[in-house]
Amino acid sequence: MEKIVLLGKTPEELKEIAVAAGLPQYAGKQIARWLYVRRARSIDEMTDLSKAGRESLKERAEVGVIEPESFVTSTDGTRKYLFKVRCRITESEWEESFIEAVMIPDGERKTLCVSSEAGCKMGCRFCMTGRQGFHGYLSARDILSQILSIEESADLTNVVFMGMGEPLDNYEEVKRALDVMTEPWGLAWSPKRVTVSTIGVIPTLKRFLDESRCHLAVSLHDPFPEERASLMPVEKAYPLKDILALIRRYDFTGQRRVSFEYTMFSGLNDSLRHADELARLLRGLECRVNLIRFHKIPDFDYYTSSPDAMEAFRERLERRGVTATIRASRGEDIFAACGLLAGQHGK
Ligand code: SF4
């Protein structure tokens, strides 16, 4: 019999598992505390459960933290972890895959960039993850393992869902992981420490905006619909104008923030005409634009914009009233930078 995985479960669900194992109802809360506050790796560690209860629980359940297979460290301190996971493709089909998480140190901050899917089905032309196709949805357990198993786990200040996959294509499991991270019974992080990045899957974007208080980042990359569609096929199903109309219905003037990611391709989307149109689309919205250097991938003819072109673009946005920053690129030597994650074993 396959064992029940405790990691990712709510106290209510843990209560049911505990009762089925002959433990009292309140053991659900005790187990949640062991999992998320004390970060236990085995049921044996849960010493305030009776010995008999622990034995009975062990017969049917396991904690389930997945340890990384390996890691590589960049000259700039960025570290890329490789995990082997078994993930769902359809209701009845499962596949073993490799996924990656990237830890980025920056002064006092340690940010972890987590994956939400193995590969990705969205097919953005400039992205290595998209190139490898879709290999399955990660479970909340797989997502939380990336956070809980790594050496820097206790020191993480932020988590961003910007690794492999489109988080809002796997909303139920991502939401479950977000709940564990931010609920008082879980890791109890402030939602301000977590950012979910999406290309704009509108139905689940709406649910995310309604059901979570975590920050939002939207991959924008081009303000003109036809050009954006040639880079990101999702534009045809969920146009940017509809995404922005939805976002404008929510309040980003308080604690919650929205940012827009804009990867810069020389001669494609880096003209001042593009900056003007971008500023027009974002007018009046409390937000930030992050300009990102493109990392060349095979069979895509564009190169990154020059530092001068990026600075001119940034200045133009600022002059038009849009806050914009050029994001430093990290971990390039270990292929950990934006758009380069491919889950290649042993890379
Ligand atoms: Fe998927 Fe994001 Fe890559 Fe697009 S950029 S293919 S959504 S991982």
Image (tube, rainbow, N blue to C red):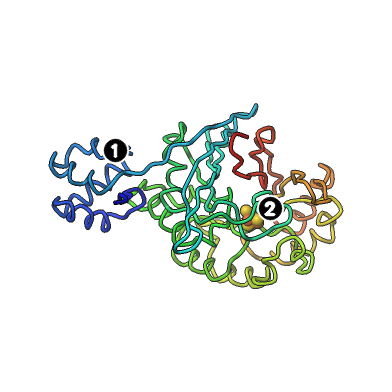
- Name the residue at 64% across, 68% down: 244
Give the amino acid at mark 2.
Arg
Q: Compared with residue 114, is residue 257 higher up or lower down, i.e. above or below?
A: below
Taking the view exactly as shown, the residue that stands out farthest to the top is: 75
Which quarter of the figure has residue 268?
A: bottom right
Q: Position of residue 316 (x, y in %)?
A: 80, 54
Name the quarter showing ligand 1: bottom right
Compared with 239, 181 (above or below) is: above
Quadrant location, the C terminus: top right
- Numbered label attached to residue 42: 1
Ligand 1 near label 2 (Cβ, under 8 Å)?
A: yes
Name the residue located 16 percent from the left edge and 42 percent from the top edge. Answer: 49
- Whether residue 61 is visible to the viewer of this picture, yes or no, is yes
Q: Is residue 55 above or below residue 74?
A: below
Type of amino acid under label 1: Ser
* Residue at the image point whose x is 84% and y is 61% from the top: 273
* Residue 248 in the image, given as x and y percentages of width and height: 59, 69
Q: Which mark is on residue 131?
A: 2
Q: Give the secondary structure at mark 2.
A: helix
Q: Nearer the viewer, residue 11 or 66?
A: 66
Estimate the x, y position of residue 161 in percent, counting from the top left.
Answer: 54, 50
For the residues labelled 2 and 1, the Cα–Cα distance comes to: 38 Å
Instruction: Decide which of tag 2 and tag 1 comes sooner along the chain.
Output: 1
Left or right: 142 in relation to 223: left
